[in-house]
């Protein structure tokens, strides 16, 4: 992820910048603005398809709230934008007017060629250290899904699936997610 700022800023200063310019996503990493390109069609399709399954389940069971791509404060100098963010009902008070002001119960990242290392290494470590209870990584290219759970301060792999398998990931173990429905159909 290219870093573009030369002067460090705080998470609250970053939030005050407002919306991103068209065509880029901005995050704050160690006080510096980092730029990532907009989503590719595969990424966008998976995000929307997965969100549809999850939000339907959350609303049906009155469990909390699901958000997408919202600024989430992880430290005084780190603001990330997980692709999907879930807060259970008892923790929705952490949803602020301009950003998430505490660790979500679940962060989901959909891999893109430009984000693979960031999502698998940088964000993995940051979400783990930040106290995110559940972390899912969905890889459209490999057609895989993996789920980690925070146990004693470390992520433990608790579920995975590939291709057309059906997965059941925490915190929604009763929700069957048919992976075949997530993958972007080939374009003609």
Image (cartoon, grey):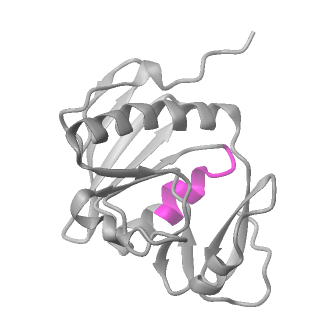
**Residue 163 visible to an observer of this rendering:** no
In this view, 186 is above or below 167: above
Picture coordinates of residue 12, whole percent (x, y): 58, 85
| Image quarter of the C terminus | top right
In this view, 74 is above or below 154: below
Region of the chain picked out in magenta, as a range: 113-123
Residue farthest along the top direction in this orientation: 188
**Residue 35 visible to an observer of this rendering:** yes
In this view, 178 is above or below 65: above
The quadrant holding residue 186 is: top right
Q: Nearer the viewer, residue 54 or 60?
A: 60
Residue for point 70% across, 71% down = 18
- Dominant secondary structure of the residues highlighted in magenta in the image: helix
Residue for point 56% across, 73% down = 79
Q: Nearer the viewer, residue 128 or 13?
A: 13
Picture coordinates of residue 77, whole percent (x, y): 56, 84
Picture coordinates of residue 91, whole percent (x, y): 27, 66
Picture coordinates of residue 45, whole percent (x, y): 59, 30
Q: Is residue 124 left or right of residue 170?
A: right
Q: Is residue 85 magenta?
A: no
Q: Is residue 140 left or right of residue 159?
A: right
Residue for point 50% across, 54% down = 120
Q: Nearer the viewer, residue 14 or 2?
A: 14
């Amino acid at each position: 992820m290219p870093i573009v700022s030369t002067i460090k800023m705080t998470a609250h200063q970053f939030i005050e910048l407002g919306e991103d310019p068209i065509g880029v996503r901005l995050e704050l990493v160690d006080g510096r603005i980092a730029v990532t390109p907009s989503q590719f069609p595969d990424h966008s399709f998976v995000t929307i398809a997965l969100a549809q399954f999850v939000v339907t389940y959350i609303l049906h069971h009155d469990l909390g709230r699901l958000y997408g791509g919202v600024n989430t404060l992880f430290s005084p100098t780190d603001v990330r934008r997980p692709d999907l963010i879930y807060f259970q009902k008892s923790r929705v008070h952490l949803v602020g007017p301009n950003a998430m002001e505490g660790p979500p119960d679940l962060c989901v990242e959909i891999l893109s060629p430009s984000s693979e290392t960031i999502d698998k290494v940088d964000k993995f470590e940051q979400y783990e250290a930040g106290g995110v209870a559940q972390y899912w990584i969905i890889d459209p290219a490999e057609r895989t899904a993996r789920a980690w759970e925070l146990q004693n301060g470390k992520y433990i792999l608790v579920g995975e699936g590939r291709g057309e398998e059906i997965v059941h990931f925490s915190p929604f173990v009763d929700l069957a997610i048919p992976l075949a429905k997530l993958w972007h159909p080939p374009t003609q």
